Image: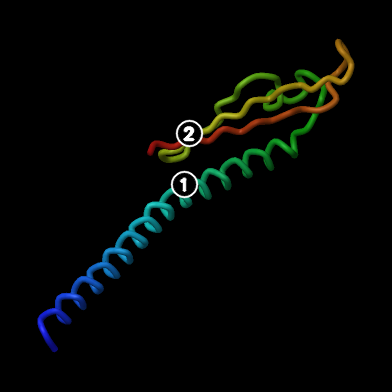
């Protein structure tokens, strides 16, 4: 092999290695983010499942479902809160159903 062929082979090999390194480093960062998202999803689903068994549109019947923001737990580095809103179809009437929004946050 001549010197030119060796240099061209080294350039091609370095480009392939750089591309693989960039691809794997990008996948590694995405996997860490996905792990946090999956943990927060399971935590939020657990809260919603717990509240689903406490459904009542009567005010004061269950304090977990009173209107407002509730901060039930802090799990590890994640913090969680949920907001309950009464949804009325008739103004001034009793609530038709409850709207629950769960927010889970974690540090970057």
Q: Nearer the viewer, mark 1 or mark 2?
A: 1
User: Could you say which is closer to the camera, residue 83 or residue 14?
Assistant: 14
Is 37 located above or below residue 21 in the figure?
above
Residue under the point 44% across and 37% down: 106
Badge number at residue 53? none
User: Could you say which is closer to the camera, residue 44 or residue 72?
Assistant: 44
Marks 1 and 2, how far apart at CA: 12 Å
Is 26 located above or below residue 13 in the figure?
above
State yes or no: discs 1 and 2 in contact (Cβ < 8 Å). no
Q: Identify the element where label 2 is drawn.
A: strand
Is 92 located above or below residue 59 in the figure?
above
User: Could you say which is closer to the camera, residue 48 or residue 28?
Assistant: 28
Residue 52 in the figure: left or right of residue 47: right
Q: Identify the element where label 1 is drawn.
A: helix
Residue under the point 53% across and 43% down: 40
Give the residue at mark 2.
79
Within-10-Å neighbours for mark 1: few <14, some 14–19, many 20+: some
Give the residue at mark 1.
36
Quadrant of res 25: bottom left
């Amino acid at each position: 092999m001549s010197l030119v062929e060796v240099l061209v082979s080294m350039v091609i090999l370095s480009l392939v290695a750089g591309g693989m390194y960039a691809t794997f480093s990008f996948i590694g960062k995405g996997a860490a983010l996905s792990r946090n998202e999956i943990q927060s999803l399971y935590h939020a689903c657990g809260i919603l499942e717990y509240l689903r068994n406490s459904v009542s549109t009567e005010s004061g019947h269950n304090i977990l479902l009173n209107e407002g923001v509730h901060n039930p737990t802090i799990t590890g580095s994640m913090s969680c809160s949920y907001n309950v809103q009464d949804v009325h179809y008739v103004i001034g009437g009793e609530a038709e159903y409850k709207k629950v929004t769960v927010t889970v946050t974690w540090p970057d």
